[in-house]
Image (cartoon, rainbow, N blue to C red):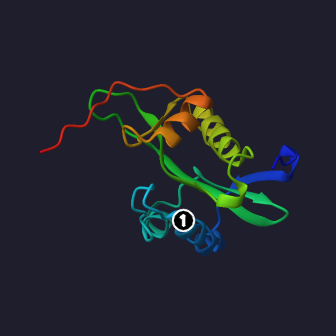
Amino acid sequence: MAIDRSKVKIRNMIETDLEKIKGIDRELVSPDRAPSWPLAAEADWWVNRPTLNFVAEIDDEVVGFLLGDIRGAKYGTDLSGCIDMMGVAPKYQGMGVGRGLVEAFSEECMRNEVGVRVVIREGDERLIKFWTSIGFQKGNLVSYER
């Protein structure tokens, strides 16, 4: 089902969006999804209130969200915009909502003269397909575990 991209409105998140984005996140929990952090969005909002949190609306309904921030250099990397959490309500996936959220985040990062980074699980083909389809490529950080 295609949607007119002009109907997708991306805006900065406000406090009253918290419950809506937690509802979307609950819809997304499945065996194929990494465990969600039901309080992470709320904690991040109350501590940082970052300008890099966005929601997507269609006909005044919140249908997606992206939470991120700009972080200092770590592990020999440059200062960058980091996408922490993103979700699109299942019935709106594949319609450009996620792309719009990432574009809004990326534009803000460009204004701040930093790149954009996201961390996903290796082997998560669905997310790999999404991120590569919008121009992301595998970075040089590797996780070691014991």
Q: Is residue 105 left or right of residue 139?
A: right
Query: Which residue appears at 49% of the width and 25% of the height?
Result: 137
Residue, disc 1? 25
At which x and y percent is residue 54?
64, 54
Query: Which residue appears at 77% of the width and 67% of the height?
Result: 61
Q: Is residue 56 left or right of residue 71?
A: right
Up the image or down, 14 lies above or below 3; here it is below
The foreground one among 61 and 33 is 33
Q: Secondary structure at mark 1?
A: helix
Residue occupying the far left of the picture = 146
The C terminus - image quarter: top left
> Which picture quadrant has residue 112?
top right
The foreground one among 50 and 92 is 92
Instruction: Name which residue type carries label 1.
Output: Asp
Query: Which residue appears at 61% of the width and 36% of the height?
Result: 106
> Which picture quadrant has residue 104?
top right
Q: Is residue 20 left or right of residue 50?
A: right
Dot 1: within a 10 Å radius of its alpha carbon, few (fewer than 14), some, or many (20 or more) residues? many
Q: Is residue 94 left or right of residue 32?
A: right
At which x and y percent is residue 63?
70, 61
Up the image or down, 74 lies above or below 47; here it is above
